[in-house]
Image (cartoon, rainbow, N blue to C red):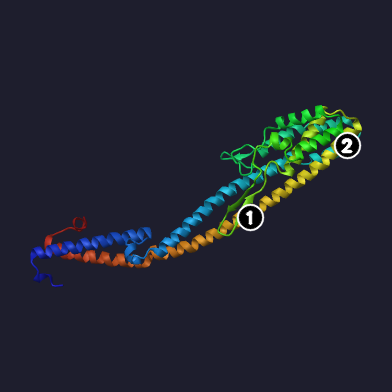
Amino acid sequence: MNYSSISDLGQSMMLRRRGAGLKTTLAHLTNELTTGERSDLSGHVRGEFGPLAGLERSLRRLDGFAFGRESVDLRVTGIQTSLEAMQGAISTFGTDMLAAASLEQSDVLDAKLASAASRLSQVTAYLNTQLSGEFLFSGVATRQQPLPDGATILSHVRSIASGSSGPADFMTQIDAWFGDAGGGFETLVYGGDAVAQSGIALSDTLSVGLPFKADDAAFRATLKNLAIAAVISEGGVAVTAAEKRSLVSDAGLAMIAAEKALIDMQRDTGVTQGLIVEASIAGGVERAVLEEAKSKITGVDQYEAASALEAVQFQVEALYVLTARTSQLRLMDYLR
């Protein structure tokens, strides 16, 4: 443009206007190069925000699933830890009882049974495990403690023992108290819900459940046989030496089966943990695809942005030279 044909005032105003435009463009390009995001997104998509809104909805959905997976993973890990601790509390106790019952040495048998009450308290405590104020083995009633302490359960068993007419009657009553629907365990002990947690979504297509509750048969069997061993150890049931060995032998076999059931529960819980990992990996892959698609809309090509910025900087410098010749400006004054 031939600036010599324009008046001094007009030339000054044109240079200022051109300089302001270049400064604005320079700021936009610098911001884009720094953030990697387009400054004028509306202009880039020409007002068509539908595809971008769809991508953002999908990303928010993935965020929701990711949060849910983190929450359920924490609970499943807690369940697995509790199951392992329970197994540790009763590990080899069944075989120890069987071995002791096979010997006609009452002191050896009593020594093996002496830890039954403490093991009962340990198992009960593990079944009452809670995370963030929610109990893991209460079914859907996560705010309700599933069991009282081991001493309370043992006091119920002692009452049954004291009122029984002999070992056979004691076992009949204890089986009914722990096993029958509406029996003592369900009405006096278990405080959770009969319904287990299920349908916890890990993704659009995958959900899991947390099926284990403190009133499950395996847990009842564990508590029952530990309580039987504790009461026998205390002499709460009037039995002969042979009857005592028979009761302890039966309890030992039941404890072995209960430990096997706990191992099976750990296996099933491990499967659930594996599903959570798989869902997390799949979610991460989907997120990467969506983020890339979003970046194509909102992001800028770093090379193009750098080239454009360099070109604008050259124009700014050229305009400064022209302006400086007419007004004796310094570059720092001009860029203010």
Under mark 2, the amino acid is Ser
Select label 1 or label 2 by which is in front. Answer: 2
Q: Which mark is residue 330?
A: none
Disc 1 from disc 2: Cα separation = 43 Å
**80 with respect to 108 (left or right):** left
Quadrant of image for the N terminus: bottom left
Choose top left, top right, bottom left or bottom right for residue 119: top right
Q: Nearer the viewer, residue 290 or 322?
A: 290
Q: Disc 1 marks which residue?
A: 274
Under mark 1, the amino acid is Gly
**37 with respect to 8 (left or right):** right
Quadrant of image for the C terminus: bottom left
Query: Which numbered disc, 1 or 2, marks the residue that appears first in the sequence?
Result: 2
Q: Which mark is residue 246?
A: 2
Q: Secondary structure at mark 1?
A: helix
For residue 251, above or below residue 270: above
Q: Position of residue 21 (x, y in %)?
A: 22, 63
Mark 1, other Cα within 10 Å: few <14 / some 14–19 / many ≥20: few
Q: Nearer the viewer, residue 261 or 175?
A: 175
Q: Nearer the viewer, residue 6 or 143?
A: 143
Q: Position of residue 128 (x, y in %)?
A: 65, 37
Query: What residue is at 90 percent from the left and 38 percent from the top?
Result: 102
Q: Position of residue 123 (x, y in %)?
A: 71, 37
Q: Secondary structure at mark 2?
A: helix
Residue extending furthest front? 182
